[in-house]
Amino acid sequence: MIRTIAIDDEPLALQLVISYIEKTPSLELAGAFDNPIDAMEYMDKNEVDLIFLDIEMPDLNGLEFTRILTNKPKIIFTTAYEKYALQGFKLDAIDYLLKPFSYEEFYKATEKAKKQIAYERADKKVEEVDSNHEFLFLKSEYKIRRINFNDIIYIEGLKDYVKVFLKDEPKPIMSLSSLKALEAKLPEEKFMRVHRSFIVNLEKIDTIERSRIVFGKVYIPVSDQYKENFNNFVRDNFL
């Protein structure tokens, strides 16, 4: 089920969206609000997958509300004003429904959201690692790869991607993920963050030179933020 809320300051418009949500099998109505502030308070304590969101509202309009969200659910804008369409899609809205809209239009927008949410849930499930396992799964180039921890030499974080460098493979595996998210899936007794952009496999370290870890021709810096932890590791294992 997709946990859904509706936000609209017009009672009739809000009631219509509520009725549409209640007749759609894949949606669960978690809440309905006539202003974004109350909705925000609800979202601070409850998980929401999808919002049907009006734009023209007093105090805080729908676009402003979307911009300040941190853990942003999927958004479908519902508005009487076509002029906001471009801004809405720049905020990664799933769809933009112009009032008055039919149930058919509502349902089609819901199906778009349903597919994206299902895709993201599947990705999350695939990447989850049992703590008893010695591997993780990563999605790369439309494939799902099983990566053994012992094969990882180091990991480099880019803006929205990670590059996982493996032994016996000339090219790294690239995956759409953050370094922080991947770090949480790695056993901390084997891997250490040594720089904002690098995680290393501690068991693969052979050479350290002037606060740099050497893997062949690659030199990975150890930044000040992580130097204390790394120096403790060196003291316990190398000296």
Image (cartoon, grey):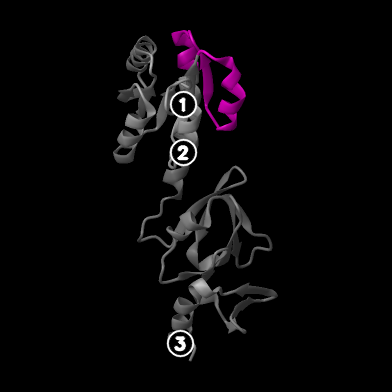
Residue 39 sits in which quadrant?
top left
User: Is residue 59 something one can see in this rendering?
Assistant: yes
Q: Amino acid at mark 2?
A: Ile
The residue shown at (44%, 82%) is: 232
Residue 147 screen position, x and y as percent? 52, 58
Residue 6 sits inside the magenta stretch: no
The stretch of residues the image draws in magenta is 80-108
Whole-Å distance between the Cαs marked 2 and 1? 11 Å
User: Is residue 116 something one can see in this rendering?
Assistant: no
The residue shown at (48%, 57%) is: 180
Task: Give whichever of 59, 127 is nearer the camera.
Answer: 59
Whole-Å distance between the Cαs marked 3 and 1? 56 Å
According to the image, label 2 marks what residue?
Answer: 68
Mark 3 or mark 2: whose residue is earlier in sequence? 2
Q: Is residue 55 above or below residue 12?
A: below
Q: Secondary structure at mark 3?
A: helix
Front disc: 3 or 1: 1
Mark 2 or mark 1: whose residue is earlier in sequence? 1
Residue 31 sits in which quadrant?
top left
Residue 2 screen position, x and y as percent? 37, 28
The dot on residue 61 is 1
Q: Amino acid at mark 1?
A: Asn
Q: Residues within 10 Å of mark 2 (few under 14, many from 20)?
A: few
Mark 3 or mark 1: whose residue is earlier in sequence? 1
Q: Is residue 128 above or below residue 30?
A: below
Q: Secondary structure at mark 1?
A: loop
On the rendered image, what quadrant is the N terminus found in?
top left
Q: Amino acid at mark 3?
A: Arg
